[in-house]
Image (cartoon, grey):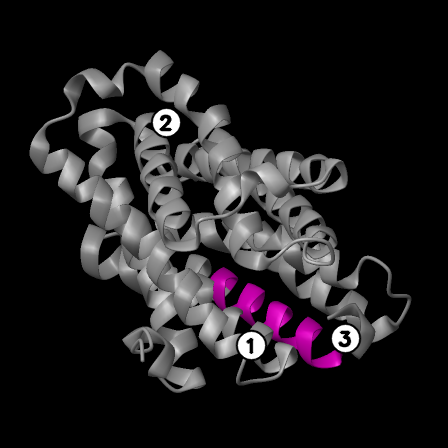
């Protein structure tokens, strides 16, 4: 009998926490690659190697995909690619923790978009205050382009969630992610070549790219899949709200990115808003 993947044996709570840490540690490694090959080549390396790993692991039967599945998986993959490359372009300009915080606005707005309850508007207000604390109101503030790129990445994240929800009804999760990652690669790789970073690749940088692909995709996807099978979606979403805080911690530890008091307060407000929106959301939205 084939042994289970050891990652799947981890209890759900530690699995989610490890997945979050893995993703943000991967983002810190990615930012460490920026000076050598740039954000677009780093995104290409991460997504391309992730696609290879996932295709080998899941072995989707591409020839058996229906027309409806192709129509769903292509935009899903393009949204995934756009989200990643734009986010990497953002965190080249602003600290990792703030980039993740701003990106989180997309899923947060999506969570309360169809609600008319006053309590849900409170979460949007808290997030808006957080953005106001981060916003570069003067020339001495954060890079404005970086802030706008992070918010745009959040918009693509919300799009990715909507498309992912639709595709989950007609296609296996592993197959959707694997095939979608191929289209994400096709979108992102030309930007990597255009940026010129591939000319600077060395065996060491390639190994770092492999570690990035594992930490950012293969390991967290496996851990999250295991956790979702053992805990309610609501609990899972609340735990995922910790990502901006974990990103700030990883940025501090791995990249020595120190945030101001107001910036840490902004991170806290977005975490509270995200967790609150999840706690008070209707079950059918989840």
Q: Nearer the viewer, residue 145 or 165?
A: 165
Number of marks in the rendered image:
3
- Which residue shows up at 49% across the image and 69% down it? 225
Q: Residue furthest right?
A: 116
Label 3, label 1: how many angstroms apart (C-alpha)? 13 Å
Q: Is residue 144 visible?
A: no
User: SS for tag 3?
Assistant: loop
Q: Is residue 133 magenta?
A: no
Q: Nearer the viewer, residue 5 or 63?
A: 63
Q: Nearer the viewer, residue 72 or 193?
A: 72
Q: Pinpoint residue 109: horizontal percent, then vertical percent.
A: 72, 56
Within the image, what quadrant is residue 76 found in?
top right
- Residue extent of the magenta highlight: 266-280
Q: Pinpoint residue 239: horizontal percent, then vertical percent.
A: 51, 76
Q: Residues within 10 Å of mark 1 (few under 14, many from 20)?
A: some
Q: Which residue is mark 3?
A: 281
Q: Residues within 10 Å of mark 2 (few under 14, many from 20)?
A: many
In this picture, is 260 found above or below 55? below
What secondary structure is the stretch in magenta mostly built from? Answer: helix
Q: Which residue is mark 1?
A: 236
Q: Which residue is mark 2?
A: 40
Dot 2 or dot 1: first in sequence order is 2
Label 2, label 1: how many angstroms apart (C-alpha)? 31 Å
Label 2, label 3: how many angstroms apart (C-alpha)? 36 Å
User: SS for tag 2?
Assistant: helix
């Amino acid at each position: 009998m084939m042994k289970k993947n050891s990652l799947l044996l981890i209890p759900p709570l530690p699995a989610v926490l490890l997945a979050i840490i893995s993703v943000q540690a991967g983002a810190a490694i990615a930012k460490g690659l920026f000076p050598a090959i740039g954000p677009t080549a780093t995104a290409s390396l991460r997504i391309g190697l992730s696609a290879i790993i996932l295709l080998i692991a899941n072995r989707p039967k591409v020839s058996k995909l229906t027309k409806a599945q192709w129509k769903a998986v292509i935009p899903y993959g393009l949204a995934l690619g756009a989200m990643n490359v734009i986010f990497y372009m953002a965190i080249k300009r602003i600290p990792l923790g703030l980039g993740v915080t701003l990106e989180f606005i997309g899923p947060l707005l999506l969570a309360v978009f169809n609600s008319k309850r006053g309590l849900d508007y409170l979460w949007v207000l808290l997030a808006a205050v957080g953005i106001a604390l981060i916003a570069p109101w003067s020339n001495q503030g954060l890079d404005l382009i970086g802030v706008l790129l992070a918010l745009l990445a959040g918009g693509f994240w919300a799009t990715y969630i909507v498309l992912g929800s639709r595709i989950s009804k007609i296609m296996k999760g592993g197959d959707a992610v694997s095939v979608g990652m191929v289209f994400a690669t096709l979108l992102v790789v030309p930007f990597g070549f255009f940026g010129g970073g591939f000319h600077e690749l060395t065996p060491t940088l390639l190994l770092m790219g492999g570690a990035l692909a594992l930490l950012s995709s293969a390991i967290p996807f496996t851990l999250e899949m295991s956790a979702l099978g053992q805990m309610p979606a609501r609990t899972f979403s609340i735990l995922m709200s910790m990502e901006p805080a974990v990103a700030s911690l990883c940025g501090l530890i791995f990249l020595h990115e120190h945030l101001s008091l107001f910036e840490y307060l902004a991170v806290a407000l977005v975490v509270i808003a995200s967790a609150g929106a999840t706690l008070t959301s209707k079950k059918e939205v989840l």
